[in-house]
Amino acid sequence: MVAKKIIDKAASGAKPKRGRPVTGNAKTPTERVQALDAALLASGGRLLNRLRLSAEAVEALAVLAKLDGSDRAAIENSLIERAKKIK
């Protein structure tokens, strides 16, 4: 019976629905970012807004980001490793 419904829809020209079903609980991008930021802060993280880097630091970040996969990972790994050397 399910196959018949699919054939009938295809014959009528109606496209089958794709993706997840609509739940009505979808968050806006702003709500998702706010939730991620709140979780970061709750776990002891910190937001750094408008961080300014010199040209030399930008070049160094580009090199490290290639190794670590992203700017954020490069910055976090560099901070953590430097702090371990000091301790």
Image (cartoon, rainbow, N blue to C red):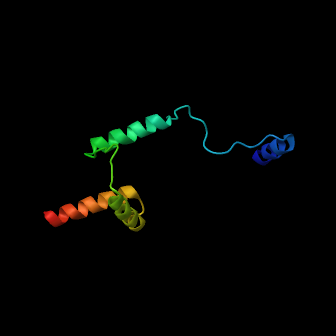
Which part of the image, by quadrant, shows the C terminus? Answer: bottom left
Which of the 4 image quadrants contains residue 80?
Answer: bottom left
Q: Position of residue 84 (x, y in %)?
A: 18, 64
Residue lying at 29% horizontally and 42% vertically, measured from the top left: 41
Q: Position of residue 44 (x, y in %)?
A: 25, 45
Which of the 4 image quadrants contains residue 18?
Answer: top right
Q: In this orientation, which residue lies closer to the viewer: 35 or 78?
A: 78
Q: Is residue 76 above or below residue 51?
A: below
Please indicate whether residue 48 sits to the left or right of residue 30 in the image: left
Which of the 4 image quadrants contains residue 71?
Answer: bottom left
Residue at the limit of the structure toward the top, as seen here: 24
Please indicate whether residue 70 sits to the left or right of residue 75 in the image: right
Q: Is residue 32 above or below residue 67?
A: above
Residue lying at 78% horizontally and 45% vertically, measured from the top left: 6
Q: In this orientation, which residue lies closer to the viewer: 13 or 57?
A: 57
Residue at the limit of the structure toward the right, as seen here: 11
Residue lying at 39% horizontally and 68% vertically, measured from the top left: 67
Q: How many marks?
A: 0
Please indicate whether residue 79 sits to the left or right of residue 62 in the image: left
